[in-house]
Amino acid sequence: MSGQSFFQGLLSSVFDRGISFSRQSDNRPILELAEALVSERGEVSGTKIAHALLTKYQTLSTEERETFLLEINDAFDVDATDVMHAAENYARDQSAPNLKRLQEVAEPRRLELLRRLNAAPGGTQSLVRMREDILALVRKHNQLKRTDVDFEHLFSSWFNRGFLVMRPIDWQTPAHILEKIITYEAVHAIDSWDDLRRRLLPEDRRCFAFFHPAMPDEPLIFVEVALTNKIENSIQEVLAEERTIIADTEATTAVFYSISNCQQGLKGVSFGNMLIKQVADDLSHSLPNLKTFVTLSPVPGFMSWLHEEADRDPESKAKEALDYIRGAARAGDVYEDPDMQQTLTGLAARYFLIEKRSDRQPVDPVSRFHLGNGASIRQINWAGDVSEKGYTQSAGIMVNYLYDLNEVEENHEAYAKNRDIKAHKAIRTMAEKNRPQKQENAPDQATKQAPNNPDAATANQPINGNDGEKASQALEDL
């Protein structure tokens, strides 16, 4: 047995171990079960209570789940008075007992409840589903954000890179996993099994996913890769039914054309940066002929930004472009107009490099993700996605982000510390030509409003849909 398989088996045994439960059910109310669980000291009895609680939760109606989550949000919260007194005691006497007491009262009981629920068989996956319920309720009940903080805190530990396993997804992968790949595809919809076969079976196609031992049948995130001999500028060419398949040993470029988060309940836990870098590193070792690693990425916020800019300035190029688009008889007319190509690609360059949020990050969620990972903006692609979705969310524009394995760490540090964006010279030139006149030779307006600590906002705001809004959310949750 190899060392790797030994430790994989050891890890799996930790997560697979369970306790036999009698058929007798625990009929106590679910909140009473929660109270009993956090006060229970026996491991076996505690695990049985956790199992009973999760089983009961699954049988609750939507309204009953809402009531339970609101109850634990309040009943298992911290006591602010206790925290204040413990903090005052520690400020006066920084002894170990005072520190321990402060830590005890500062942690909400919800955290211990979640830890003990996680000990039940299937507990991790049940908690991921429970958080999906919370995320669906936070707009209605803002106070549930406190409980959501607890979930995100624990999930960040439970799903850290040390527990994740990367696995290739191919045509030999079990069907129930492949079905989930079809369902979870968040950027370019997979329409059929034949469509999936075209993405997995050919020699010049790859797919990789992260799994967690506690959820072995549930991919957390996956990336689809095209092996090519050029930097692809059109998703239609990448996904074409009739195309020339090349040998993987002849490919010079790996194109990451789709990356999808699979678990909405893990929103805020970033996997995408780790997955892309590990795939690029593994491919560079297994296929040394690969020299270039790029994405072919959507621009989900571009059309929304054009509308905002046109409303703000009726004399802007954005207003001119939108008027042209509205007046075009069909999308193809826009793509065939060289003047419109120049106008919209120039606006896109400005959108990537000049338009910023108050934290000095780009307004585009895809840019924030890839630039935060250490990529650079390599190429803006006119008519990169001529589907209806691509037309309505980005006027058909796509972009290549370059992952230079020799520079990603340096680029990441520059972006994280100073919000420096690395981009091809031609894109910078286009962006400057399209800079609004009032911003010429002046700092970006958004930069003036930036917080004193720009690093307070995470560079990789965590990417999980087939329409524009869903794709944008997918990229935010990576």
Image: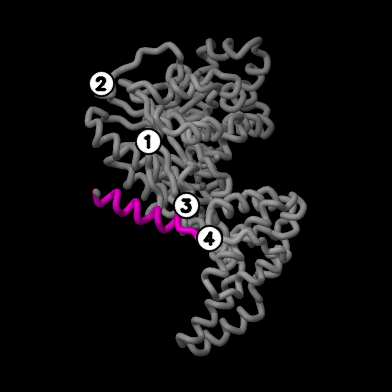
In x, y percent, where is residue 477?
53, 44
Badge 3, how many Cα within 10 Å: few under 14, some, many 20+? many
Quarter of the image for residue 427 reads top left
Q: Nearer the viewer, residue 89 or 364?
A: 89
Determine which residue is flagged by label 4: 20
Residue 250, numbered circle:
2
Give the answer, above or below, for where 230 lies relative to 140. Answer: above
Question: Can you tell which of label 2 and label 1 is closer to the viewer?
Answer: 1
Q: Residue at x 52, y 85 (%)?
A: 90
Q: Earlier in the sequence, mark 3 or mark 1?
A: 1
What secondary structure do most residues of the magenta stretch adopt? helix
Query: Marks 3/1: CA distance?
Result: 18 Å
Badge 2, how many Cα within 10 Å: few under 14, some, many 20+? some
Determine which residue is flagged by label 1: 168
Please say whether residue 436 is visible from this viewpoint.
no
Q: Is residue 12 magenta?
A: yes
Q: Residue at x 30, y 20 (%)?
A: 229
Part of the protein shown in magenta? 2-18
Query: Marks 1/4: CA distance?
Result: 34 Å
Question: Can you tell which of label 2 and label 3 is closer to the viewer?
Answer: 3
Q: Earlier in the sequence, mark 4 or mark 3?
A: 4
The answer to whether the residue labelled 3 contacts the one labelled 1, judged by CB atoms less than 8 Å apart, is no
**Residue type indicated by callout 3:** Ala
Q: How is the image coloured?
A: one colour
Q: Earlier in the sequence, mark 2 or mark 3?
A: 3
Query: Marks 4/3: CA distance?
Result: 18 Å
Quarter of the image for residue 174 reads top left
* Residue 35 shown left or right of residue 185 in the figure: right
Residue 214, numbered circle:
3
